[in-house]
Amino acid sequence: MSSPEKAASKASASLQRPVIGPATRWYAASVFPGKEDVAERHLRIQGFHPFVPRCEKTTRHARRIETRPAAYFPGYMFIALDVALQRWRSVNGTFGVRSLIMQGERPLPVPSGLVERFIALTGGDGLLDFRGGLAAGASVRILSGPFAEMIGRLDRLDPAGRARVLVAIMNGEIPVDMDSRELVAIA
């Protein structure tokens, strides 16, 4: 199996939905630096359902530029657990995992809908895609900040989620750089 095929099968495996029971929640776990893939593999072997949001990261070293998938939250991952039914303490002993994020003696669940939103934003390649239907040239409404509720034209959108919007002010278009989460496409 070639490298792109491995990446695609790995991405599709990581996006399979866990069997969600009424008490299944997502929990955050701290992992050792750069060991997200190792921890994810070992958790799957044990029957857990981990999820690591990934984005493309460009690194430069010795006049070489390399773009590769990397954890969006380096050193952290999410795990779907039913703490009443599953042996969640074994997560802390898994190779690559430091520990679950705890509140007292119990794991601390992440806010409902957070991980589900990351899964929804994950493309077929296994990488986060923050564009949410936005495309260059589209009309957008700015949701927050000093230009809130203004209408503009999306000039460009980068993979990191930053956007440049051209806002019509005083007979001209002023470029405004912002986070793409502050935008919504309009018809």
Image (cartoon, rainbow, N blue to C red):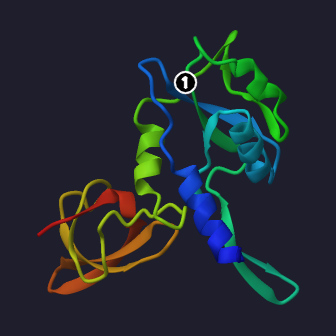
Q: Quadrant of the N terminus?
A: bottom right
Q: Position of residue 145 (x, y in %)?
A: 32, 55
Q: Position of residue 73 (x, y in %)?
A: 64, 50
Q: Is any part of residue 55 visible from this angle? A: no
Whether 113 is drawn above or below 23: the answer is below
Amino acid at the residue labelled 1:
Pro
Whether 84 is drawn above or below 135: the answer is above
Per the image, the residue denoted by label 1 is 109
Report how many numbered discs are placed on residues in the image: 1
Q: Residue at x 74, y 28 (%)?
A: 91
Q: Residue at x 54, y 24 (%)?
A: 109
Q: Residue at x 50, y 72 (%)?
A: 159
13 or 98: which is nearer to us?
13
Label 1 element class: loop
Q: Position of residue 183 (x, y in %)?
A: 29, 62
Give the farthest residue toward the left: 187
Give the farthest residue toward the front: 1
Label 1 packing within 10 angstroms: few (<14), some (14-19), many (20+): some
Image quadrant assignment for residue 57:
bottom right
Image quadrant assignment for residue 93:
top right
Give the farthest residue toward the bottom: 63
Left or right of residue 143, residue 5 in this image: right
120 or 64: which is nearer to us?
120
Q: Quadrant of the C terminus?
A: bottom left
139 or 170: which is nearer to us?
139
Q: Is any part of residue 84 visible from this angle? A: yes
Q: Position of residue 71 (x, y in %)?
A: 66, 56
